[in-house]
Image: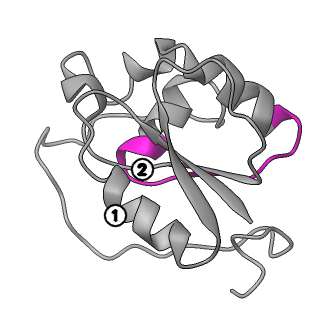
Amino acid sequence: MRFGVLQFPGSCDERDALVACERIGEARLVWHSERELGDLDVLVVPGGFSYGDYLRAGAIARFAPVMDAVREFGAAGGPVLGICNGFQVLCEAGMLPGALLPNEGLRFVCRQVELEVVNAETPFTRTL
């Protein structure tokens, strides 16, 4: 299995994601200015404050040259995993339905939440 791990200026968790992917198969970093992904099986968009998140999380990263290839990869059925800020990048890029909204107090909130697996037939959910 060949993994690509996206790296944006200001991100900080791509090395951890790369090590995790290397435990399963081959993995390489994909720099934000690349326009082609090459022969990848899985794409990981890790967390870590892409472009410093100066505007809002993921808002600038969605314009990176690599994102056209990421959208094409996902549209063709390629598995794309967005972790933390990576999830926000995918939302901003229009790849995930819904919206990211500020919480009521405009401050960080840490609490347990319930999750429901609505499709257990994906590579990410089939063991849940």
Q: Which of the numbered marks, if any, corresponds to residue 16?
A: 1
Image point (80%, 76%), residue name: 120
* Segment tinted magenta in the rendering: 75-87
Asked if residue 14 lies in the magenta stretch, the reply is no
User: Which quadrant is home to the C terminus?
Assistant: bottom right
Asked if residue 80 lies in the magenta stretch, the reply is yes
Q: Which amino acid does label 1 sit on?
A: Asp
Neighbours of disc 2 within 10 Å: few (<14), some (14-19), many (20+): many
Neighbours of disc 1 within 10 Å: few (<14), some (14-19), many (20+): few
Compared across the picture, whether 44 is left or right of 77 comes to left
Compared across the picture, whether 113 is left or right of 115 comes to left
Q: Where is residue 25 in the image (x, y as percent from the top left)?
A: 65, 71
Q: Where is residue 108 in the image (x, y as percent from the top left)?
A: 14, 51
Q: Where is residue 66 in the image (x, y as percent from the top left)?
A: 57, 22
Compared across the picture, whether 13 is left or right of 73 comes to left
Q: Nearer the viewer, residue 72 or 85?
A: 72
Q: Quadrant of residue 68?
A: top right
Image point (44%, 60%), residue name: 18
The answer to whether residue 65 is seen in the rendering is yes
Disc 2 designates what residue? 46
The residue tagged with tag 1: helix, strand or loop? helix
Q: In which quarter of the image is residue 117?
A: bottom right
Image point (57%, 58%), residue name: 27
| 58 over 21 or under it: above or below | above
Question: Disc 2, disc 1: CB below 8 Å?
Answer: yes
